[in-house]
Image: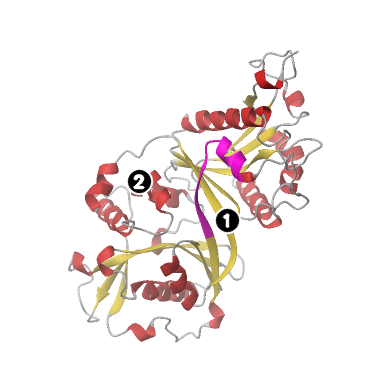
């Protein structure tokens, strides 16, 4: 008889039609909030006819005596304890670039009698085999699509599942992620500011006058090489010694990160700005690079009566840090959001980035939820030299 020590896992891509029967089990294994986000994402993909962005992988341990390289019938594979991974990759913009980043929407073991938990003892040979096989399959499938980095946002609370309790059969989330080849990058804290708490004529950064900050719409067109390079160079400078997910900046080039923003469904090119200081109201806003303070990237969310504005990214170049420019950028973001009928501004910040958190909280932002971000890099950053030169 084949022993546990000699058994290995098999993985295969399965039809998305299987999601109809698997989704209830997946939702039972994650928090209500994350489940709602997953349902919203899937609903939007269906509405936009973009289900081709999804990849569903299933893994199991073949029964004793069955060759590992034998592809099980899909119905058989889905009837046994198995690991599932649902990934998304592609552009949400019709003519936008395909992102070099893919996203794990769900990964875990969903067995018929052990919903939401790994169906093998944590740390057992079977558990490790399934995890490693799934990790290799993820890398192979996404690598064939040109993906360089796979990101995975997970609930910070290990006891997040609705009915789940810690037991010997449930592999801790961090162990499962590590077996897949992912490493923890950061814990993000999501903040929100309700704009009705600030009067229309109020200035969050009003006490920082007289020197003012002007926003100039950035030329982000990838067809105008010189201007696009100038924009990327500015953003790149703001990443120097960043405290916000520095591990992510090490894994992707600035262009990769910006292409990821462009591929987002909420991409709003009219809300990408250069931030310049100006002591006089009639100064030439593009007169000198010495006036470049940083950048601001916003995105609109929702088409309901009261949509939200996301502060996707803001950064200040090193020589201008510590002078209150971050507060001015937040002030501009809130004013722009209000002018476009948004009822709130939302953002995410690395929990370790205390200076930014203090600035946001002083501006009236409050935490609403947190999550861990894990990453798996499939290929090296191609233009490390550009980052070295920028420092």
Whole-percent x and y of residue 309? Answer: 51, 67
Q: Where 96 sits versus 242, above or below? A: above
Dot 2 alpha-carbon crowd within 10 angstroms: few under 14, some 14 to 19, many 20 or more: many
Q: Quadrant of the C terminus?
A: bottom left
The residue depicted at 61 percent of the width and 66 percent of the height is: 304
Residue under pointer 1: 371
Q: Nearer the viewer, residue 264 or 331?
A: 331
The answer, for residue 30, to whether it is visible in the render is yes
Whole-percent x and y of residue 171? Answer: 67, 40
Secondary structure under tag 2 reads loop
Residue under pointer 2: 253
Which stretch did the figure color magenta? 174-188
Left or right: 153 with respect to 205?
Answer: right
Q: Earlier in the sequence, mark 1 or mark 2?
A: 2
Check if residue 175 falls in the magenta segment: yes
The residue depicted at 77 percent of the width and 38 percent of the height is: 21
Q: Tell which tag, 1 or 2, sits nearer the viewer.
A: 1
The residue depicted at 72 percent of the width and 25 percent of the height is: 74
Dot 1 alpha-carbon crowd within 10 angstroms: few under 14, some 14 to 19, many 20 or more: many
The residue depicted at 32 percent of the width and 38 percent of the height is: 382
Marks 1,2: beta carbons within 8 A: no
Q: Quadrant of the N terminus?
A: top right
Q: Quadrant of residue 67?
A: top right
């Amino acid at each position: 008889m084949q022993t546990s020590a000699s058994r290995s896992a098999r993985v295969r891509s399965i039809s998305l039609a299987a999601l109809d029967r698997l989704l209830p089990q997946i939702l039972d294994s994650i928090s209500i909030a994350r489940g709602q986000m997953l349902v919203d994402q899937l609903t939007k993909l269906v509405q936009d006819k973009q289900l081709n962005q999804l990849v569903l992988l299933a893994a199991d341990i073949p029964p004793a005596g069955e060759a590992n390289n034998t592809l099980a019938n899909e119905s058989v594979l889905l009837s046994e304890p198995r690991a599932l991974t649902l990934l998304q990759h592609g552009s949400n913009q019709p003519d936008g670039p395909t992102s070099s980043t893919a996203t794990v929407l769900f990964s875990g073991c969903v067995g018929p009698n052990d919903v939401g938990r790994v169906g093998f003892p944590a740390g057992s040979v079977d558990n490790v085999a399934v995890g490693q096989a799934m990790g290799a399959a993820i890398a192979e499938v996404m690598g064939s699509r040109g993906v360089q980095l796979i990101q995975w946002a997970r609930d910070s609370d290990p006891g997040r599942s609705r009915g789940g309790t810690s037991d010997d059969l449930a592999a801790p989330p961090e162990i499962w992620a590590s077996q897949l080849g992912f490493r923890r990058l950061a814990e993000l804290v999501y903040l929100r500011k309700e704009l009705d708490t600030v009067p229309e004529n109020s200035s969050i950064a009003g006490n920082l006058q007289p020197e003012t900050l002007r926003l100039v719409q950035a030329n982000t067109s990838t067809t105008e090489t010189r201007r696009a390079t100038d924009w990327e160079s500015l953003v790149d400078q703001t990443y120097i010694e960043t405290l916000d997910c520095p591990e992510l900046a090490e894994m992707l080039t600035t262009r990769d990160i910006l292409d990821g923003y462009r591929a987002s469904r909420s991409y709003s090119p009219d809300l990408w700005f250069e931030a310049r200081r100006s002591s006089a109201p009639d100064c030439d806003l593009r007169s000198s690079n010495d006036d470049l303070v940083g950048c601001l990237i916003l995105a609109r969310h929702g088409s309901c009566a009261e949509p939200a504005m996301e502060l996707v990214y803001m950064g200040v170049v090193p020589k201008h840090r510590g002078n209150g420019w971050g507060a001015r950028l937040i002030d501009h973001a809130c004013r722009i959001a209000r002018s476009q009928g948004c009822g709130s501004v939302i953002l995410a910040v690395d929990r370790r980035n205390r200076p930014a958190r203090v600035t946001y909280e002083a501006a009236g932002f409050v935490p609403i939820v947190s999550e861990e971000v894990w990453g798996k890099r499939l290929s090296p950053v191609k233009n490390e030299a550009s980052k070295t030169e920028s420092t």
